Amino acid sequence: MRTNVNGPNTGNGDTKKTLTYRWTFRQKRVKLQFDGLDTYAEIYLNGRLVGKTEDMFLPYEFDISNSWLRLSNNVLEVRFQPIESLVGEESREKPFSAAFGDNMRSYVRRMQCTFGWDWVHRFVTAGIWKSCRIVSYDDARIDHIFVYTKSIKEHQAELKLELGTTIFENSNIMSKFLITDPKGKVVWTRSERITSSVMKFDVTISDPRLWWPNGAGEQALYQITAVLTDTLGRELNRYTTETGIRTVSIEELPDADNQGKSFTLIVNGKKIFVKGGNWVPADPFPSRITGQKYNLLIAQARDAGMNMLRSWGGGIYEADAFWHACNRMGIMVSQDFLLACAEYPENDTKFKLLLNQEFEANIKRLRNNPSLVFWCGDNELGLNSKPDDNWSCKNLHQIMTAPLVANLDPSRVFRLTSPFGDDLKTNNSPRYGDSHISGFFNDEIREGDLHDYRKIISKYCSGRFMSENAAAGSPPKRSLLKFMDEQDLKGSEMYEYHTKDNPYTSGGLTLFRSLERCATLLYGDPENNNDRRISQLEYTQYDFVRLAMEGSRRLKFYTSGIQFWMYNDCWPASGWSLIDYWGNRKAAWFAMASGARPVIAASEMTEKLIKWWICNDLSSDANVNVEVKVQPLAGKAKWVKQIKINVPANSSMVAMELPLDEMKEKLGDNAVLVCEISYDKGFDRSYWTAGLPKDTKYPKTTLKISQKRESNKGEITIKSDKWARVITLSADADLDFEDNYFELLPGETRVINWKSRDCPFSGQISVTCWNQ
């Protein structure tokens, strides 16, 4: 018999949580299991101490067979102890450097970011944050199943299957395996007597259906079931897991001039350009994250055309629901072990043993997920170091973590830290490995006049693989009003509180003030129009994300990926994320969706030329119609150049080169250079102005709007007589618009579809633009 109890994370300072179980049982062995306790706890059963816990990320199991249990009225207590009482004195006597100031976090194995970070406040909790249960059984149980793809040939795949069991009293136990394909058809079966605690099998799957990242193919999932039976054929234990048939590796090849190395993900033999973001816990109280919210957030990533998330090292090992969603939606994941931006007591024997247990348990839990593509030791512990330096936990990872991953998960690469590469001068190199660099998060943007902002963005999105590339921006007004009021929106105090800040940056401005300054320099003074002010704070992030996508994709595969900091939010904030805390699409989400289209146009400005690139992520050649035109803000195009080109599969190439000075003269302050492309599966546009965006004098225009709607979906038709700048759709409910924050050319009509997330929608949808 199995009893499940989900205990809430108290989050309110409680130090004791009592749960009562009543049941009858017949099995010989009874285990008490906790999937997650935050953090220091003593467990009592009927007044007797069962055991203690000291790691939020480590599952615990206690044997409560024999005299522990009564026939009725069993009382289970979990008593939590304050962190301060256990590590406070030690952290003061032997402090370790830790970003954002709380030295205790280096000693505590719990979610690091909620000790306080530059994007979330301090929320140090205590409680039962994952499921707990009582499990009973007789003579055998399955401890784990592990399956991975060894190789894929033309019509078959070779897998390795591992079964781990616990068998008591030398019982004669049989195992039976079933592997079913995505349609439920049994494609492999085998029966075997259990002869050791770990048994391994070679598996051949004919005509396999492969698992691919989003945009590259289908997400075929296979189910593996193992059953243990006794000599009479009675079932003793059953275990089921899912996996996908796919191979993954990282290609690092030296450049011809030996001045750098590639860093490219290879999935099923194909190069994949990574379009993604950094995932942080979706709530500071992670027990509140439901399967529904995981599905929403991962679906938003898929719908934006993303194919990868980085599970960041200051958070948690996410719940199974997160991984199931990523498996089904084709979102690859790199997983940091949970160490971030600090020094740690790596030489303490007890701490190392605890890390070893934590890492082993979570490798085993996560390794069957096809979405998991590689492991990383930590986040930024070696950020300001050279590869030969001895930064925090480097030695620990080399002698403990790397062998552990190699033994428990031989199918995946282990990266020592992030960022990390082979540049002898720095771990954070744009020429080697992965890098944490950003056009927004540097002095040229925070202190400059931004006249070269497009070149700055381009420079900082040209690394080999940018596992962090930051751009800040506000959520829409409707989301802001969930944690501010109208008066707050006119000031800065609440913005500052919810935007947070990084104390290590230069320039003398907070993140919010830097964002506001940037928005004003780019788009002009909003002149006491607060709605326009908010919109500019939104659109700044749109601009940076779209330009970064263009800049990185045209360098394919010199650059092989960009992951924005950050994808989601941990609490109601107004900073880095592409979607807000509630899963609503920010302006930057639409920039990501635009820049992640399978085929896009991308601009590059040199000293004398404007170059237009076509970037093709399709697995097939694209026959593309390219039209570049000088488009006045009213009336028809004055200068048009058209070509047709074939862009090879999975590549990027220059389509057109134009003289810079001549184009500037043609544009002046009343026209925009537009590159529009179309092919059989879609379209894209890229824009370029002679000066800063604010220098172009957009005339007043009138929008004509009509709507059709059903109960929870509809469409809006929008037409403008002149150029419509930053058309923005908003509603008084959670609606997902297929496009937003876009431009309409003079006389153009667009139809935008929308759907309501929760229920039938009968409210109002507004459509505005900056020059309305």
Image (cartoon, grey):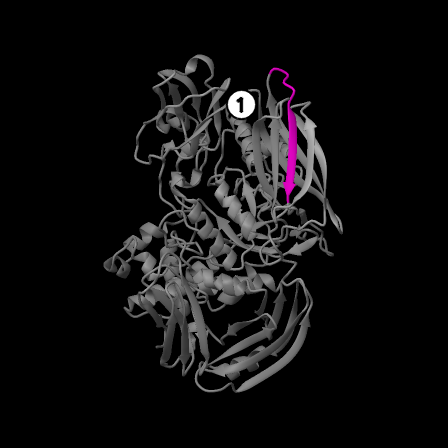
Camera-side residue of 484 and 523: 484
Horizontal side of residue 688 vs 489, given as left or right? right
- Residue 206, given in percent of the width and then of the height, sits at 73, 47
Q: In this view, which residue lies farthest toward the right? A: 154
Figure disc tally: 1
Residue 44 visible (yes or no): yes
User: Which picture quadrant has residue 347?
Assistant: top right
Horizontal side of residue 766 vs 594, given as left or right? left
Camera-side residue of 16 and 545: 16
Height in image: 695 above or below 439?
A: below
- Residue 546, given in percent of the width and then of the height, sits at 50, 64
- In the rendered image, which residue does mark 1 sit on? 349
User: Which picture quadrant has residue 409?
Assistant: top right
Which amino acid does the dot numbered 1 rest on?
Answer: Thr
Residue 697 visible (yes or no): no
Height in image: 184 above or below 353?
A: below
- Residue 474, given in percent of the width and then of the height, sits at 38, 59
- Residue 693, given in percent of the width and then of the height, sits at 44, 72
**Which residue lies at the image location 23% right of the left edge and 59% below the top edge?**
487
User: Which picture quadrant has residue 274?
Assistant: bottom right
Horizontal side of residue 377 vs 503, given as left or right? right
Height in image: 52 above or below 127?
A: above
Magenta-colored span: 169-180
